[in-house]
Image (tube, helix red, strand yellow):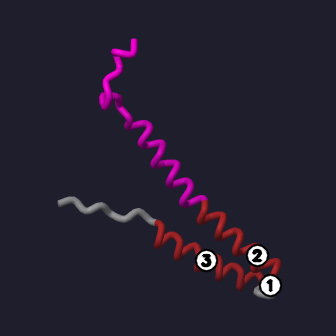
Amino acid sequence: MAGDYHRGEMDIQEQAATYDAFGKMTKWGSLAISVLLLFFTLLFCTSAGFIGSAIASIVLLVLGVVLLKEKPTQSH
């Protein structure tokens, strides 16, 4: 039974896709939590008010999307 295994012959496409999806969910989920945390912290713990909190949160969201988006791969 152990002799049936041959290293490198198994299709790992599904595992690779799951790993990639988990990384993307972690990245974008962290950004969403950070934006919400900033919004509620500024709203309830400072005198920034709703508008100030919303502006700061939108700025963080835009910066996060720009910095975290997938970079195009270059092929030679």
Where does residue 14 sit, x and y in percent of width and height? Answer: 42, 36
Q: Amino acid at mark 2?
A: Thr
4 vs 65, nearest the viewer = 4
Which residue is the site of mark 3? 58
Task: Report if the CB atoms under discs 2 and 3 are less than 8 Å apart.
Answer: no
Instruction: Give the CA distance from mark 2 to mark 3.
Output: 14 Å
Lower sequence index among marks 1 and 2:
2
58 versus 21 height, above or below: below
Looking at the figure, which quarter contains the N terminus?
A: top left
Q: Residue at position x 53%, y 71% from top?
A: 64
Disc on res. 30:
none
Disc on res. 41:
2
Q: Residue furthest left?
A: 76
Magenta highlight range: 1-29
Tell me the element at label 2. Answer: helix
31 versus 51 height, above or below: above
Where does residue 26 sit, x and y in percent of width and height? Answer: 56, 55
Lower sequence index among marks 1 and 3:
1
Answer whether residue 2 is magenta in the image.
Answer: yes
Q: Is residue 36 left or right of residue 69?
A: right
Q: Amino acid at mark 1?
A: Thr
Which residue is the site of mark 1? 46
Q: Which image quarter: residue 31?
A: bottom right
Mark 1 or mark 3, whichever is nearer to me: 1
